[in-house]
Amino acid sequence: MKNLRVKYLDLGRSDYKIIWNRQEELLKQIVELKNRNGNSDTDMISETPNYLIFVEHPHVYTLGKSGDEHNLLLNFIQLQAKEATFFKTDRGGDITYHGPGQLVGYPILDLENFGIGLRQYIYNIEEAVIRTMAVYGIEGMRDPHATGVWLDVGKPSVRKICAIGVRSSRFVTMHGFAININTDLDFFKHINPCGFSDKGVTSLEQELGSKQDFNHAKDIVLEKFAEVFGAIIV
């Protein structure tokens, strides 16, 4: 029984740890339901739900499970001075920054509902963001050596506009993607973004030369996400 409905939760601006805990709760509920389904007769199987959280975070740096703490170029006192926090996480990827003006999306999906694996899932997220960029007249691209969405791949001016870092349990996902809309890019100067010291970062505001309508950007990303995944947003 495949469920293509995705419950959309716009949680406004919220602390990173609060949303991390919320993701953990939703993932646990879905995994437990899948476990019960595995032990049930066919006519007793319940469909598993899917969620998509949109949120902005206060200034925070997060490190993936295989990341290097040395890619954070601030000490604790400097972090406090920036009114930023730091978390080690259980997602893939290295270090990244989240903050105001950045759209963070956390899909908690049962990939079996969509008939895809983790590699295709990441590809689909990239595709949704690439299609979003196209609406703004920007050519988003994949880098064969790194996840995310980039501009000017293969050129010295290569720069990232969307970071992706995920984990999954029993084909249920959490963590997700972060698109720089009106992000203060100075905060990226204090890290080697995603472990790269030779690549830059950018935002829609930077590329287009003016602050963008954040809610309009959310609407476009939501539309492209549904389009790529074949999801029904509820």
Image (cartoon, rainbow, N blue to C red):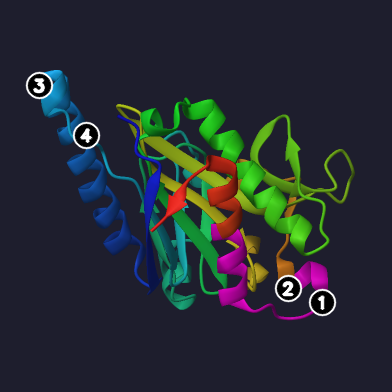
User: Residue shown at 48%/27% (left/top)?
Assistant: 116
Q: Judge from the rendering whether residue 78 lies leftward or rightward of residue 21; answer left or right.
A: right
Residues at badges 1 and 2 in contact (C-beta under 8 Å)? Answer: yes
Secondary structure beneath label 3: loop
User: Residue shown at 66%/70% (left/top)?
Assistant: 186
Return the disc, 1 or 4, that comes first in the chain's sequence. Answer: 4
- Kind of residue at badge 4: Val
Q: Nearer the viewer, residue 110 or 41?
A: 41
Badge 1 density bin: few <14, some 14–19, many ≥20, Cα 10 Å: few
Return the disc, 2 or 4, that comes first in the chain's sequence. Answer: 4
Q: Return the residue at label 1.
A: 209
Secondary structure beneath label 2: helix
Quarter of the rendering occupied by the N terminus: top left
Residue 85 location in percent, x, y? 40, 65
Q: Return the residue at label 4.
A: 31
Q: Is residue 72 visible?
A: no
Return the disc, 2 or 3, that comes first in the chain's sequence. Answer: 3
- Kind of residue at badge 1: Gly
Residue 224 location in percent, x, y? 61, 53
Per the model, the C-alpha gap separating discs 4 and 3 is 14 Å
Label number found at residue 40 = 3
Badge 3 density bin: few <14, some 14–19, many ≥20, Cα 10 Å: few
Q: Kindly report which numbered mark, 1 or 3, lies closer to the viewer in this rendering.
A: 3
Q: Kindly report which numbered mark, 4 or 3, lies closer to the viewer in this rendering.
A: 3
Look at the picture and state if 129 lies above or below 2.
below
- Kind of residue at badge 3: Ser
Count every numbered label the image shows and give the total: 4
- Kind of residue at badge 2: Glu
Return the disc, 1 or 3, that comes first in the chain's sequence. Answer: 3
Q: Is residue 105 visible?
A: yes
Residues at badges 1 and 4 in contact (C-beta under 8 Å)? Answer: no
